[in-house]
Amino acid sequence: MIKNLILDWSGTLANDLPAVLQALNRMLRLFRKPQLTEEEFRERFRLPFTEFYDEVLPGIPLEKVKSLYLRFFPNAVPQIPLIDHARDFLEHSAAAGRRMVLFSSAPGDHVEQQARNLGVWDFFEHAACGVVDKREHIASLMTRQQFLAHETAFVGDMRHDIEAGKAAGVLTVATCTGYESVAKLQSAQPDHLVANLREFMNLLDQRATTSPSP
């Protein structure tokens, strides 16, 4: 039975892609680089984000990129909505007694502000944010929270999330609501590919009713 949920934020719970793209294009304009459409961004963006920024802003130190991103992004923060079914999913999971943590590459201040604005911050007992490579940090997160792999699922919207979940031996769930296409997500071979969080919520309920009694 799944008792613990590791949840990505961007593209999984919150629709921040337009705001992220706005911040990126302001950086690209600053350095006189071609701006990206949403389609181009979705095709090229990847995690770890260091690889992506090395490609679109070559030669710009990572700390400079981070500083500019923080400078250009905040004006869009209040506009960020939850993804469809996210609130119902969080409420249902909390009612079922599942422990939930956030595991995100987005800056911690942004995630916390957005989650508080949306009234969902208190669902999470811990937030690990600003993580460059989740594959390298998921083991320490699991240890910190005392999560057992067979009782844990990692839900994300990118191949990197699935790779991180596989590295930890947890159930991997790809949701088709975020940054990467279905084809890209399928290439990572998640344990489950769902259209949205309601579909995963129903799947969890089915697993709970079919799991053998202890």
Image (cartoon, rainbow, N blue to C red):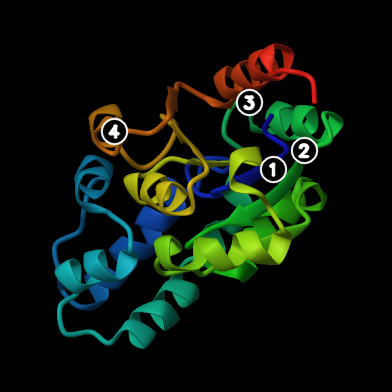
The quarter holding residue 28 reads: bottom left
Residue 179 in percent (x, y) is at: 36, 42
Q: Nearer the viewer, mark 4 or mark 2?
A: 2
User: Sequence-wise, which precedes: disc 3 or disc 2?
Assistant: 3
User: Sequence-wise, which precedes: disc 1 or disc 3?
Assistant: 1
> Residue 85 — which label?
3
User: Sequence-wise, which precedes: disc 4 or disc 2?
Assistant: 2
Residue 163 in percent (x, y) is at: 36, 49
Task: Give the residue drawn at x 20%, y 78%.
Answer: 31
Image check: 204 left or right of 76? right
User: Sequence-wise, which precedes: disc 4 or disc 1?
Assistant: 1
Residue placed farthest to the front in the image? 214
The quarter holding residue 207 reads: top right
User: Sequence-wise, which precedes: disc 4 or disc 3?
Assistant: 3
**Label 1 belongs to which residue?**
4
The residue closer to the viewer here, 184 or 65, is: 184
Q: Are marks 4 and 1 in contact (CB under 8 Å)?
A: no
Residue 138 in percent (x, y) is at: 52, 61
Question: Disc 1 residue type?
Answer: Asn
- Check the image and report above or below for 94 versus 205: below
Label 2 sits on a secondary structure element that is loop
Let me know if residue 4 appears in the view.
Answer: yes
Let me know if residue 118 appears in the view.
Answer: no
**Label 4 belongs to which residue?**
181
What number of labels is visible?
Answer: 4
Q: Are marks 1 and 2 in contact (CB under 8 Å)?
A: yes
Q: Nearer the viewer, mark 1 or mark 3?
A: 1
Question: Disc 4 residue type?
Answer: Ser
Task: Give the residue drawn at x 20%, y 73%.
Answer: 54
Local packing at callout 4 (Cα closer than 10 Å; few below 14, some 14-19, many 20+) is some
